[in-house]
Amino acid sequence: MSRMKFEDRKFTWKKDTDIKEEFLSKLKPSTARTVRNILLKVDEYESEINKSVYDFNIEERDDFFISKFNNKSKDVIRTTKSPIVQYINYCIDAHLVKHMENRFALISNDDIELYTNVQAMEMKYLSREEIETAQDKLVNYCDKLILQLMPFIRGRTEKNNTNEELTNLRVIDAEEAQKTKSLRVWNNDGDYRYISLDEKTLYLLKKTIEAKEYIINNGKNYNRKRPDKELKMGIGEKAFPFSDTGYVFRVSGGAKQGKVKPTFFNARINTIKDWVGNPYLTPTNLYFSGMIEYAKQLKEEKGSELDKMDYIKISRKFEYGKPRILDNGEEDWSVVIAKIKSKVEDYFKLKGHE
């Protein structure tokens, strides 16, 4: 039987099928083979965050490189970057990119150094103890609570629903959780689920609700990006009152009502990472940290390697991914399992978890 030609093989794209195939059709067959493999990694990450590569923000762009490439050489990053830049330019020319910006073209040599730094992998996913160490460096309870909740409370990753369970977190539900040890969290469709809480999380919830003001700059008297530069007249000691909105997470310094915006948490994490000294701290990395911590727990409880059902259990607990329904009605979890398993095994290998 003759071998199937590469260009005749069928690939199943999850995002932007037509434009990807159209772009590849313009390339030489030998070039298309290499570029297709790169775009398959792009497509995989796109499906994880439900966003096209040309709409990745800077954080997502950086996380893509750190997450998807085990070979950390600078040459690999450069040769990977080039076709992605070309593909995004092609999408811009096709009028698919509303903001008209190619963020992959903005990658600098410093960025490449970040992607190839082994320390990035070591600091990317945090254990429970490492999260506690980071929390000890924060003065506001609401900031501590964000680090506590993000590993297991997040919401759907699709547009307009990012961080929905955090933005919708109500004081009334947090107060009820003090009695029941179970917190009700809501999505933007009005559906809810219950999550069991430990004593530390309940304590941080209670202290966050009781807080009347937010201490700016984490109580420090210096610029968070330039510790050598002292700020004027003790600005770090200033605090602004919280608005009373009925929600756990609130803004300070004004009479704003209602929920915070989903981008509130990304902006806050971007500030917290400087305070705690971890440049790789992101909402996505915290979420996967929660999955990895749970995987560690399952592995320790059973005393053996994780199997298919363990990974399905992780997926369901964190509402990460859905199975593909086969023609016979059975659930195919292979893609979801592969995504979680790769992150868990990479972490175990790097951290030496037995």
Image (cartoon, helix red, strand yellow):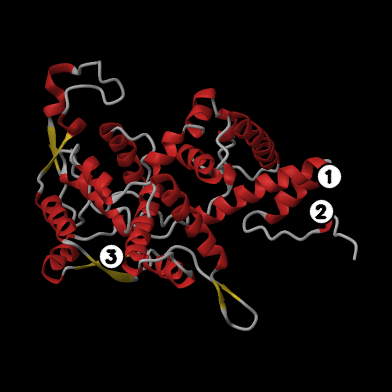
Q: With 102 as the anchor, is 158 left or right in this view? A: left
Residue at image mark 3: 185
The label shown at residue 6 is: 2
Nearest to N terminus: mark 3 or mark 1: 1
The residue under the point 56% across, 28% down is 106
Q: Is residue 101 visible?
A: no
| Amino acid type assigned to the residue bearing label 1 in the image | Pro
Total number of numbered labels? 3
Callout 1 touching callout 2 (CB < 8 Å): yes
Question: Looking at the picture, does residue 305 appear above or below residue 57?
Answer: below
Q: With 285 as the anchor, is 194 left or right in this view? A: left
Q: With 39 as the anchor, is 345 left or right in this view? A: left
| Amino acid type assigned to the residue bearing label 2 in the image | Phe
The label shown at residue 353 is: none
The label shown at residue 29 is: 1
**Helix, strand or loop at mark 2:** helix
| Amino acid type assigned to the residue bearing label 3 in the image | Val
